[in-house]
Image: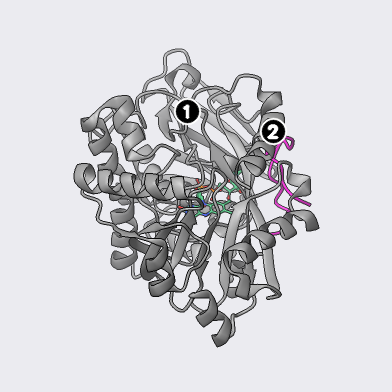
């Protein structure tokens, strides 16, 4: 049974966790459900990276904060992603941001994206988080010669305009240095990866230690506005609160709250993990050390060598939730891996799972407090509702940063530059919400032909 946010009215606490390699190698702590009425100043709805980070920020500021999640720790993307730590979020490159809003805005946005990576690494160090952090090369690989030229030109632009160091790699370099065949060129950047489920467990530990109250298996099923705040009900309890932070991201159910309904498009991404590669397979495929990769296809493939010598390989998933585990979906992804690494043909697929990423209409995530839907005379004294979502599949570092920013905005902090595109407007509403899946199907068919 797969949860489908465009169809379901809620994440049931009965749904099983993903059958992921992460769950096979780490058991997150069990946190209690809410079985009573509670009062809190801030209520966070959604306990992935965004929500837990918001709770940490509020607790660090000595605020009274309660968090509800509908299922177990790591049920959402936090327990399903590839664990790549990337600087950036949304789907716009720094150059695209520069073209649209100018150099100063692009630089300030780069500050936010790099700030996200810095925050993650700082918290790992400050709170001694055990998350299997591995550093190693991150290669962007071109899947045709035109993309190779574009990739190199964009790397040069990033280096000269934004100080992002990278080394161009020719087809020959890729073979000689990494044993990678079949790519038309690429660029090498600094990369880092971690165990995503261990990260969410560590965030939960820290949030609790700092004084946040966490309830899991407790879906928020209704949000009522009252004179001085909100009443949020769960199946066996309720929370009276002044402020609500919605951090349910791509797992936000259908018709959940006016501030987020139809504001993002949940799209599936799928991952499989192979059996451990033999030494011969590793040498033949060039996958000898912890490295991570992304290609230039419209429907990107991403892969990394795991610390125990398995290959994690990911790409787009099925259009509908009910098709997530179909054999044809597994085979499509497996074929793509064999195309990149012929020597791995026949290797067993030990794990396969999928998750939902939240795509915003204009490719820009938002961290926003919606005064229009908070109430007619919304103010901090009568309560606010805000959200952070729309990361378009890039949130291992950024989601926690967004959670911190959302908490700061909720507390009325002046630290956030509200003129940036991340903060100054709400997520755009998707027109023709019902046709979204049809359009996605069409896009996948077109990409299949265009990228043959
Ligand atoms: C297959 C896959 C691979 C990815 N790989 C990468 C990667 O390598 N690098 C990268 O940077 N990003 C990656 N991402 C994206 C990244 O994982 C997400 O951007 C990030 O985890 C989002 O965190 P979040 O806390 O906002 O959302 P989530 O972790 O999805 O948390 C949302 C939570 O809300 C809860 N919820 C839903 N409804 C309710 C309700 N009514 N009441 C209470 N709780 C509710 C859910 O149970 C869930 O736990 C990937 C995503 C997927 C799916």
Query: Gap in Å between the C-alphas at discs 1 and 2?
Result: 19 Å
If you read the primary sequence from the N terminus, does the residue marked by circle 1 or circle 2 appear first?
1
The crowding category of the residue bearing disc 2, from other C-alpha atoms within 10 Å (few below 14, some 14 to 19, many at least 20), is few
Q: Residue at x 48, y 26 (%)?
A: 427
Instruction: Residue at the far top: name it.
Output: 376
Residue wearing tag 1: 362
Q: Residue at x 67, y 72 (%)?
A: 345
Q: Main secondary structure of the magenta part?
A: loop
Instruction: Residue at the far bottom: name it.
Output: 279
Is disc 1 in contact with disc 2, using a CB cutoff of under 8 Å?
Answer: no
- The image position of residue 117, as x and y in percent, is 33, 54
Query: Is 410 displayed left or right of 352 in the figure?
Result: left
Query: Is 237 displayed left or right of 115 in the figure?
Result: right
- Compared to 384, does 125 lie above or below? below
Nearer to the camera, 112 or 222: 112
Q: Residue at x 59, y 51 (%)?
A: 76
- Compared to 136, does 444 lie above or below? above
- The image position of residue 123, as x and y in percent, is 32, 60
- The image position of residue 438, as x and y in percent, is 72, 30
Q: Does the magenta stretch include residue 12?
A: yes
Query: Is 110 displayed left or right of 228 in the figure?
Result: left
- The image position of residue 135, as x and y in percent, is 36, 69
Which secondary structure lies at badge 1? loop
Which secondary structure lies at badge 2? helix
Residue wearing tag 2: 442
Q: Can residue 233 be seen in this view?
A: yes
Q: Does the magenta stretch include residue 395?
A: no
- Compared to 414, does 1 lie above or below? below
């Amino acid at each position: 049974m797969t949860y489908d946010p465009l169809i379901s009215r809620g994440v049931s606490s009965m749904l099983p966790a993903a059958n992921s390699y992460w769950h096979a190698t780490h058991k997150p702590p069990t946190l209690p459900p809410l079985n009573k009425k509670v009062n809190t100043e801030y209520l966070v709805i959604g306990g992935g990276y965004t929500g837990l980070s918001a709770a940490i920020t509020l607790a660090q500021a000595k605020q009274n904060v309660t968090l509800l999640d509908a299922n177990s720790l790591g049920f959402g993307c936090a327990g399903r992603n590839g664990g790549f730590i990337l600087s950036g979020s949304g789907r716009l490159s720094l150059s695209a941001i520069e073209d649209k809003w100018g150099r100063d805005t692009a630089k300030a946005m780069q500050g936010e994206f790099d700030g996200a990576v810095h925050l993650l690494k700082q918290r790992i160090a400050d709170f001694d988080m055990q998350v299997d952090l591995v550093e190693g090369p991150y290669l962007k690989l071109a899947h045709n010669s035109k993309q190779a030229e574009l990739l190199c030109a964009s790397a040069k632009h990033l280096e000269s305009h934004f100080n992002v160091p990278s080394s161009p790699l020719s087809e020959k370099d890729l073979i000689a240095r990494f044993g990678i065949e079949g790519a038309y060129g690429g660029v090498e950047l600094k990369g880092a990866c971690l165990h995503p489920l261990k990260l969410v467990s560590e965030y939960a530990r820290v949030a609790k230690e700092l004084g946040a109250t966490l309830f899991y298996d407790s879906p928020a099923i209704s949000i009522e506005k009252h004179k001085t705040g909100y009443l949020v009900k769960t199946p066996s309890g309720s929370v009276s609160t002044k402020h609500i932070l919605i951090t349910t991201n791509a797992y936000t159910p259908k018709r959940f709250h006016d501030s987020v309904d139809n504001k993002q498009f949940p799209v599936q991404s799928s991952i499989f993990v192979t059996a451990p590669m033999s030494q011969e397979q590793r040498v033949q495929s060039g996958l000898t050390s912890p490295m991570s990769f992304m290609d230039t296809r419209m429907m990107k493939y991403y892969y990394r060598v795991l610390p125990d010598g398995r290959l994690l390989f990911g790409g787009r998933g099925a259009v509908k939730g009910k098709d997530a585990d179909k054999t044809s979906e597994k085979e499509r992804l497996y074929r793509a891996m064999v195309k990149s690494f012929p020597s791995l043909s026949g290797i067993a697929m030990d794990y396969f799972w999928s998750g939902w990423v939240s795509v915003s209409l204009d490719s820009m995530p938002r961290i926003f407090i919606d005064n229009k839907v908070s109430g007619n005379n919304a103010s901090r004294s009568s309560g606010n509702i805000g959200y952070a979502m729309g990361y378009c599949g890039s949130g291992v570092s950024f989601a926690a940063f967004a959670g911190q920013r959302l908490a700061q905005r909720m507390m009325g902090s002046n630290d956030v530059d509200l003129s940036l595109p991340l903060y100054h407007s709400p997520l755009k509403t998707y027109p023709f919400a019902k046709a979204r899946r049809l359009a996605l199907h069409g896009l996948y068919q077109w990409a299949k032909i265009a990228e043959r």
